[in-house]
Amino acid sequence: MENSLQSKHKNTKIRKKTIKALTYTALGIWALIVLFPFYWMILTSIKSYGSYNAESTPAFVPTDPTFDNYITAFTSVPLLDYFINTLIFTLATTALMLVVTVLAAFAFARINFKGKNIAFTIFLSLMMIPSELVVITNFVTITNMDMRNTFMGLILPSVTSVFYIYLLKENFASIPDELYYAAKVDGTSDIKYLLKVMVPMCKPTIITVTILKIIECWNSYVWPRLITDDEAYYLVSNGIQAIREGGFGRENIPAMMAAVTVISIPLIILFLVFRKKIMEGVARGGTKG
């Protein structure tokens, strides 16, 4: 009987180890598939124009790496100007979005007013409308307001998000009501309670929303492409297209990959630094109580 239990225990351990090994193997293969485009982008960016065109079959290891393509990316086109424009657009949009999102989430989570549930339901229904459907309306509105080729025209349509408000509202709602009532008894205003209690307690979710918005702004393409035709207001995403059409030329793929690598590095670093905060914030935002 004892031998049978030991054998069963041994088989269970072997089965668990086998499942674990297979899981990690599958995750490793998937990671390689996901990361391969980034590797290929960096690999191509350090190949010279001549060696890249001379390859009959793609080389997975560079034989004569060069960083001339990165110099070309900054000297042949105003890539630094695109960076500055994108930085201004990203920081301003994210800051305004945080103000709107935090106040709206607080109102739906804590302030009682007539028709709140109906208003929130209607608000959530906006998530069912594809963003492409409102692009023309936004374009006409911004054009009529004479805001084309301005930072305000770029920023205004992106200062709110139904999803981010919903995510933060659920996080705010998880804070016990007793804290709010106790604060009101002490004479604390709603704004002070929001800033001193709710925001610190929900910091992971707010950080997550901030990072996701930064990534969204940095990768924005369709709206900036529509609302700006002045190169002085190009963002990096639009700048890449301009580079491809009038910069190095369509055939200089290594220089293009160098520019794309430079543009991608800030987001990669941002995600690697705050990846734990992102996961924690999403988990907290989806858990109530």
Image (cartoon, helix red, strand yellow):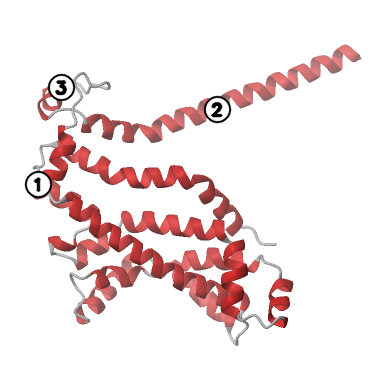
Kind of residue sitting beneath label 2: Tyr
Residue type, label 3: Glu
User: Which of the two marks, 1 or 3, is nearer to us in this view?
Assistant: 1
Examine the rendered structure and indicate whether residue 286 appears above or below residue 110.
Answer: above
Q: Quadrant of residue 139?
A: bottom left
Check the image and report above or below for 24 versus 262.
Answer: above
| Helix, strand or loop status at disc 3 | loop
The mark that comes first in sequence, 2 or 3, is 2
Report if the CB atoms under discs 1 and 3 are less than 8 Å apart.
no
Where is mark 1, residue-wise? 247
Instruction: Give the x, y percent position of residue 72.
Output: 13, 39
The single residue placed furthest to the top in the displayed view is: 3
Return the mark for residue 24.
2
Question: What residue is disc 3 on?
Answer: 55
> Can you say which quadrant of the picture contains the N terminus?
top right
Residue sitting nearer the eye, 121 or 237: 237
| 69 vs 18, nearest the viewer | 69
Distance in Å between CA atoms under marks 2 and 1: 44 Å
On the image, the x and y values in percent for residue 102 come to 51, 70
Q: Is residue 234 above or below residue 74?
A: below
> Residue 109: percent from the left, percent from the top?
60, 73
**N-terminal of the two: label 2 or label 1?**
2
Q: Using the rendered image of the protein, determine whether residue 96 is visible from the camera's viewpoint.
A: yes
Residue 161 appears in the figure: no
The residue under label 1 is which amino acid type? Answer: Gly
